[in-house]
Image (cartoon, rainbow, N blue to C red):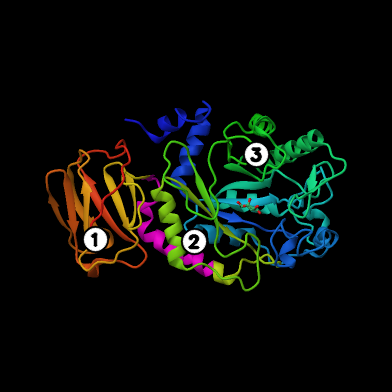
Amino acid sequence: MLTSLMILSSAFCESNSSKQEKLKWWMDARFGMFIHWGPVSLKGTEIGWSRGREIPTAEYDTLYKQFNPVNFNANEWVQLAKDAGMKYIVFTSKHHDGFCMWDTKYTDFNIMHSPFKRDVMKELADACRKQGMALGFYHSTCDWHHPDFPVTSPGGTVRRETSNLDRYTEYLKNESVEILKNYGPLLVMWYDVPMEFDTVRGQGVIDEIRKVQPDIIVNNRTGAMGDFDTPEQEVGGFQNNRPWETCMTIANQWAWKPNDEVKSLEQCLHSLIRSAGGDGNLLFNVGPMPDGQIEPLQVTRLKEMGQWLKKYGYSIYNTRGGPFKPADWGVSTRKENTIFLHILKWNSESPKIVFPVLGMEITSCILADGGGAVKLTKQRGTYTIQFPKEALRPVDTVVEVHTAKSVMDIQPVNFIIKQ
Ligand code: GLC
C-alpha cells in the first residue's frame, strides 16, 4: 500500500527519514497559525510593503524606537492557537523591512533596541515548548533595509548603486543558524520573496540550516524547491504528490490594520476544509496590535473555528485529501477505511449524492454527529446516498462513508454529484 510517506519520497524529497516523519506530522496537523508582527503595527499599514510607500523609509525604519507592546503575552498567543485547533505557529522573525524580532548579534536593528527590550521570539519559543505547540519562523529572504541587498524599498523596486549579494547571503545564513540554535529545534523555516536568489543560492541557505537541524522542513521560497509548495490567499488545487500549504489572512492584511474586516466563520472554515480536501494545509494569519494583543474580532473567529474542530476535527486532522477531488459542492478527506464527504454547498430539495464504486464495498454510511439516517443504494457502477434536506448542517455537512477495506490507495478521481 502506497502511504503518503512513500509517495513523498518518490517525488521531490531527500532521503532524510526523520525529515519525512516531520513532514508527515506536519501534513497530519493540517492547520497552523501565521503571525505577522513588527513595529509597523504602530502605523497599521502592511509590513514591509508600506516602507517607502505609505510611510517614508526614514520614518518606517525608526518606528522600533517607539515600539513597546506591553500587553504581549506569548502564553496567551499559544493558548489562542490551541483554542483555534491549530497545531503549529509560524512567526515573522524578519520581514522584508529587515527588522529582527529576536536578540541577534548580527545587527542592532532588532527588538532589544526598542523600548520593549524583550526577546519576543525566546518568549514565544518557551511558551510553545511549555504548551506543546510546534513552532516555525517566517524569515524574509529579501531584506530591503540591509545595505548589501541589491534592491530596496518601495517593494524592492529601487536598485542600490552598491551592494554585495554574497555578503548578504552569508548574513541571511548566519541569521537563520542563530535562530535555529537559539530557539530550536523548530518544525519549519518559512522563507519568503527570494528576489535576487536563484536555485543554487536558495539551496545553499537550506543546506546551511540543515547542518544545524537536519530534519527541519523548508518551504519553496528561498529560490529553491524546498519541501512544500505555498499557494497564497487562495486554496491550492488538489495535489497529493508534493506537500503544500495555503497561507491566508483572517482579515485583509498580513500585519494588523485598524478596523479591518475579519472573514466570516464559513469563509474561514471552508478555506481549511477545502485545503484538507485538496491534500494541503492551511496557515492562517493573524496580525497582533501594537500593544501585543491580538484583535478581539480575530480571537473570536479563531475560537469559533476551534469549536467546529472540536466536533469535526477527526475528519480533517490525520487525513489525506480525496479520493474524490474537490468540486463546487464540496470536498472529501480520507483516513484508513473511512471517506468523509464535506458538503459545503447544496441547493436542491432532496440531497442525493451519486459516486463511482471505485472497487469499494461500503459497510455503512452515516451523517456525522448523529445527524440522521442516510439511504444508501447501489446500482451497477455507482452508489447513491440520500438524506433529508433538514439533515444539512450550516458550513459543512459531514457524511461518513465506511468501507470494508482501506481507501488510502484509491487513485483520486473527479466526483460526479447529482443534486
Ligand atoms: C507575500 C507578501 C508578504 C507576506 C507573505 C505571506 O509574499 O509579500 O508580505 O508576508 O506573502 O505569505
Q: Secondary structure at mark 1?
A: loop
- Foreground pick, 122 / 288: 288
> What is the CA distance from the residue labelled 3 to the residue labelled 1?
45 Å
Image disc number at residue 375? none
Q: Amino acid at mark 3?
A: Thr
Residue tagged 2: 83
User: Is 32 rendered above or below residue 395?
Assistant: above
Q: Amino acid at mark 2?
A: Asp
Residue tagged 1: 419
Residue 360 is situated, as x and y percent measured from the top left of the image, at 20, 41
Q: Which of pointers 2 and 1 indicates the residue nearer the eye?
A: 1
Closer to the N terminus: mark 3 or mark 1? 3
Residue tagged 3: 222
Q: Residue at x 12, y 48 (%)?
A: 379
The quadrant in which residue 6 appears is top left
Local crowd at mark 1 within 10 Å, few (<14), some, or many (≥20)? some
User: Is 400 rendered above or below residue 187?
Assistant: below
Q: Determine whether label 2 and label 1 are within 8 Å by CB.
A: no
Q: Determine whether label 3 and label 1 are within 8 Å by CB.
A: no
Residue 89 is situated, as x and y percent measured from the top left of the image, at 57, 51
Q: Amino acid at mark 1?
A: Gln
> What is the CA distance from the residue labelled 3 to the residue labelled 2?
32 Å
Local crowd at mark 2 within 10 Å, few (<14), some, or many (≥20)? some
Q: Residue at x 39, y 45 (%)?
A: 318
Q: Quadrant of the N terminus?
A: top left
- In the displayed structure image, the side of residue 42 where residue 107 appears, left or right: right
- In the displayed structure image, the side of residue 159 where residue 359 appears, left or right: left
Residue 248 is situated, as x and y percent measured from the top left of the image, at 54, 56
Q: Quadrant of the C terminus?
A: bottom left
Q: Which residues are magenta?
A: 299-320
Q: Main secondary structure of the magenta part?
A: helix
Toward the bottom, the furthest residue is: 259
